[in-house]
Image (cartoon, grey):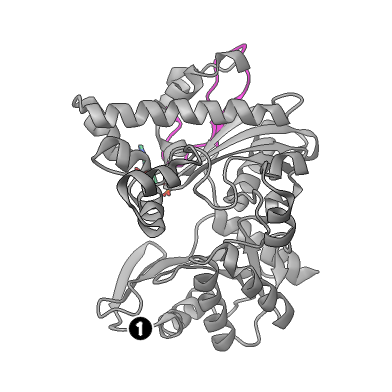
Amino acid sequence: MPARNILVINCGSSSIKFALVNEEQPQFALSGLAERLGSPDAQVQWQHNGNKDSLILPHADHRSALAQVLPLVQTAAGGQLHGIGHRVVHGGEHFTSACLLDALSLAAIRATAPLAPLHNPANLLGIEAAIKLFPDLPQVAVFDTAFHQTLPEHAFRYALPDALYREHGVRRYGFHGTSHRFVSQRAAEISGLDYQHSSWLVAHLGNGCSTCAVVDGQSRDTSMGLTPLEGVVMGTRSGDVDPNLHSHLARTLGWSLERIDAVLNKESGLLGLSGLSNDMRSLEEARAQGHPGATLAIEVFCYRLAKSLAAMSCALQHLDGLIFTGGIGENSALIRSKTVAHLRLLNLSLDESANARTVRGASGAIHAQGHSRVMVVPTNEERQIALDTLTLIEA
Ligand code: AMP
């Protein structure tokens, strides 16, 4: 049987990220981004076998943008497309793993929308457009939350009145599950350990950041909660704050809920602390020039990240390794070094030359001899979504 091709789609409210994943090729034959959909400046850009191209599509919606992408996909796949995998942010308690898309599963994803009012409806736009354009292809939804459905109740419950959980689903769900699963599996593979009998701490550090405790191939705790705002410091999200902050800001400044939401989600984190940027590269450059805000943002980011990892260690019996991934985790030797420096009680220490050279897509161990394992493992959510899609198609 020739190697199979899966189109992976990650749909936002005004964008579609896509990649054509071949089960045997490490590189994507085709990848691209349609953005500013619905506006006069809508456009799609793509890379096919290393060649870049783009097309302006004024006022294109999700369906017409996907229709433009379709011939590119068919060409890149040599006419052999076997299925489509969709990233869906929230699967609630209903979805504990990926699922084939049909009328029932679509209704269940729609029913989960109140838990992710910004993300799930956007994901559904992509799914509905793809089903109309490819009615005969099997299509699969892969959920960011599903991997965390193995959290024990003591880890996923908030100390709130029981009815808020029972009647309204207020609990911790966690996100970035596809990434935590992919890198913990890869780390076990690279280390020659049996994934089903291994224990990991994972730091996924991109624009969004989260930590996770993975035991015997299952998520046992994670830093994000009901929404992706909980947990560690992120690009523009605050992470944990005092839950009374909302009422404090409303009372003392007269701020509306919408304003408080926007500040915590879009104006806080690295951007808020530094007053400069949400981008770690820019902050590292500014810190090197002595910028006090950038210096403080990096210190707070690393300390709170270390605190979260130490908290996650409560879910482990032993530690096989700490894994760094995501744009920051894969590239920033500084952030890894500063974070690990706070974790000496977990017997963590880095080999600084291994740390410095393990960047730009490299993977491997970066710990000092005699200390617990620390690894850098590049994430690949598209590949994981394609693998899950293939598994369901085979089943
Ligand atoms: P992601 O969302 O996974 O693409 O990660 C985006 C984050 O990774 C941004 O904060 C980038 O500044 C950061 N990043 C990418 N490359 C580097 C680098 N070489 N050094 C530090 N941060 C980086």
Q: Which residues are magenta?
A: 357-376
Instruction: Determine the main secondary structure of the stretch shown in magenta.
Output: loop
**Image vertical order of residue 84 relative to residue 344, above or below:** below
Q: Report x, y in % for residue 319.
A: 69, 25
Q: Nearer the viewer, residue 281 or 386?
A: 281
Mark 1 lies on residue: 60
**Image vertical order of residue 188 relative to residue 348, above or below:** below
Q: Is residue 167 left or right of residue 295?
A: right
Q: Residue furthest front?
A: 251
Q: For residue 256: magenta? A: no
Residue at image x 70%, y 63%? Answer: 98
Q: Nearer the viewer, residue 338 or 54?
A: 338
Residue at image x 63%, y 61%? Answer: 143
Q: Report x, y in % for residue 315.
A: 72, 31
Q: Nearer the viewer, residue 125 or 252?
A: 252
Residue at image x 67%, y 70%? Answer: 2
Q: Residue 343 sits in which quadrant?
A: top right
Q: Residue 51 sits in which quadrant?
A: bottom left
Q: Residue furthest top?
A: 370
Residue at image x 49%, y 72%? Answer: 122
